[in-house]
Amino acid sequence: MAETEGDQKKDEGKKIVHTYPLIRHSDMPEEIRVEAMELCVTACEKFSSNNETAAKMIKDTMDKKFGPSWHVVVGEGFGYEVTHEVKNILYMFFGGNVAIVLWKCS
């Protein structure tokens, strides 16, 4: 069957929802990146309705494992520009439109 014009317009308005972590930028070593990504996914799943608590969990855990001073932003619809230590930044999406920026600076 041929699609009608109305069906085509419905498809154009749909958003793609990613159910897996999508890394947009990272310069971390592989082992730290994998651990940080898993931590971000766990925090966002555990505190799906509270981004502030998820960010606090990520920050506290990263500080304990990899030393201070880690910073985290969890949310939707934001831009960022940060100064960070080399090989210590991760920018990813999870659960569709939740973005996480994790970086270290002293």
Image: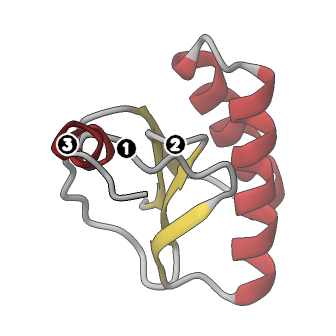
Q: What residue do we see at 42% from left, 61% from top?
A: 105
Q: Secondary structure at mark 1?
A: loop
Three-letter code, disc 3: Lys
Which colouring convention does the figure follow? secondary structure
Structural distance between the alpha carbons of marks 3 and 2: 21 Å
Q: Secondary structure at mark 2?
A: loop
Q: Which residue is mark 1?
A: 15
Q: Position of residue 27 (x, y in %)?
A: 50, 85
Nearer to the camera, 31 or 69: 31
Q: Nearer the viewer, mark 1 or mark 3?
A: 3
The image quarter in which residue 49 lies? top right
Q: Which residue is mark 3?
A: 9
Relative horizontal placement of residue 42, taking residue 88 as reference (left or right):
right
Q: What residue do we see at 44% from left, 39% from top?
A: 97
Q: Position of residue 77 (x, y in %)?
A: 26, 35
Relative horizontal placement of residue 38, taking residue 87 as reference (left or right):
right
Image quarter where the N terminus lies is bottom left
Residue found at the far front of this picture: 1
